[in-house]
Amino acid sequence: MITTEPARGSLLAIEPMDARQISRLLQLARRMNPDRPRPLLRGKRVLLLFYEPSTRTRSSFEIAAKSLGAMTTLVLSSGSSIEKGESLLDTGYTLRAVGADVIVIRHPQAGAPLLMASHLDIPVINAGDGMHEHPTQALLDAYTILRHKKTLKGLRIAIIGDIYHSRVARSWMHLLSKFQAQITLCGPPEFLPDVASEFVSGVHITRTIEDAIRAADVVMVLRVQKERLAGVKISLQDYISRYQLTLARLKLARRDALLMHPGPIIRGLELTWEVADCPQSAIVEEVKNGVPLRMAVLAAALGKAN
Ligand code: ASP
């Protein structure tokens, strides 16, 4: 079946969503609890199609689906017909033909989930596409922040690290700016090109980590995305000395500041061992919150949001 509009119920990116749609998903997530399973999706089949490595996203989607009574099937690019050269769309048609009700896809190319959603009649959920977006990560992080802070409006949020190669950073910026947070981006030019300020309006850019962190309510740190660095020359030693989040640097933030990171964390690179485990760290909580949030996303995708 060929359609031009993405299939109803798809979640492809934060950019086209409005604040009300986002708030509705966050509210729904508050009513979800994997320890109190609800059979909202009994009999539904959730296909997890992963062309790139994943630990948190994949396992939490699977647990979320099962907590709602759905069946899950995992297809990885290695070991499947994708290795034999099957196209993305043919894989999608195949998964639809075996009875998928929803496809959760992670793919190295930006736009792959949109392409699939435009050709299938079942919802497609983006679990990360290239350097484009990772919408459920941004949603679970908004959910996490709102468990500690009353509102996103006016919050001072510092985003530090490899911003250019990060789909999470893009989804964060779209989401946080829809709720009028004050965003400061910080990183070296290789990870935050000078031209960024021309494209990202209303966002402050600094090359000095201390400036970014001072008085922040939330400090978000990103991994150096080594798998996307082809052709980028950067000294990791220099990076560590100028941009690594240390306890001394974190002290510049507000006393009640939250430290966040989408994972996987590389201790000793973008943050120190002590920072990863400090009392302000919400890193484990983010992972935990991924389950109710993804329960909400799956339920909404299949029209069971009530
Ligand atoms: N897990 C996130 C992603 O898939 C962040 C990262 O890999 O650094 O984009």
Image (tube, rainbow, N blue to C red):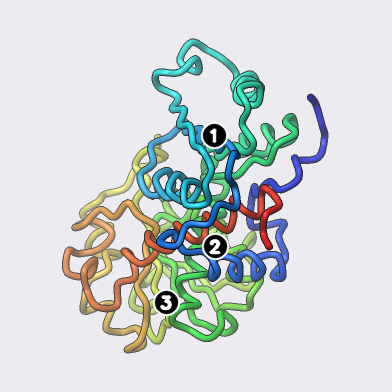
**Mark 2–mark 3 distance (CA, rounded to whole Å):** 15 Å
Which amino acid does the dot numbered 2 rest on? Leu
Residue 125: x and y in percent read: 60, 44
- Mark 3, other Cα within 10 Å: few <14 / some 14–19 / many ≥20: many
Q: In the image, which is nearer the foreground, mark 3 or mark 1?
A: 1
Tell which circle, 2 or 1, labels the residue nearer the N-terminal end.
1
Residue 187: x and y in percent read: 40, 62
Pointer 2 residue: 139
- At numbered mark 1, what does the secondary structure look like: helix, strand or loop? strand
Pointer 1 residue: 47
The structure residue drawn at horizontal position 82% and vertical position 32%, both measured from the top left corner, is 3
- Mark 1, other Cα within 10 Å: few <14 / some 14–19 / many ≥20: many
- At numbered mark 3, what does the secondary structure look like: helix, strand or loop? strand
Q: Is residue 220 above or below residue 74?
A: below
The structure residue drawn at horizontal position 63% and vertical position 73%, both measured from the top left corner, is 202
Q: Nearer the viewer, residue 294 or 68?
A: 68
Q: In the image, which is nearer the foreground, mark 2 or mark 1?
A: 1
Q: In this view, does 77 lie above or below 105?
A: above
Relative to 281, 20 lies left or right: right
Relative to 293, 87 lies left or right: right
Q: Is residue 161 visible?
A: no
- Mark 2, other Cα within 10 Å: few <14 / some 14–19 / many ≥20: many
Q: Quadrant of residue 254?
A: bottom left
* Disc 3: residue Cβ within 8 A of ligand 1's nearest atom: no
Which amino acid does the dot numbered 1 rest on? Leu
Q: Quadrant of the C terminus?
A: bottom right
Residue 224: x and y in percent read: 34, 50
Are the two marked residues, 2 and 1, in contact with CB atoms closer than 8 angstroms? no
Pointer 3 residue: 218
- At numbered mark 2, what does the secondary structure look like: helix, strand or loop? helix
Which amino acid does the dot numbered 3 rest on? Val
Q: Can residue 75 be seen in this view?
A: yes
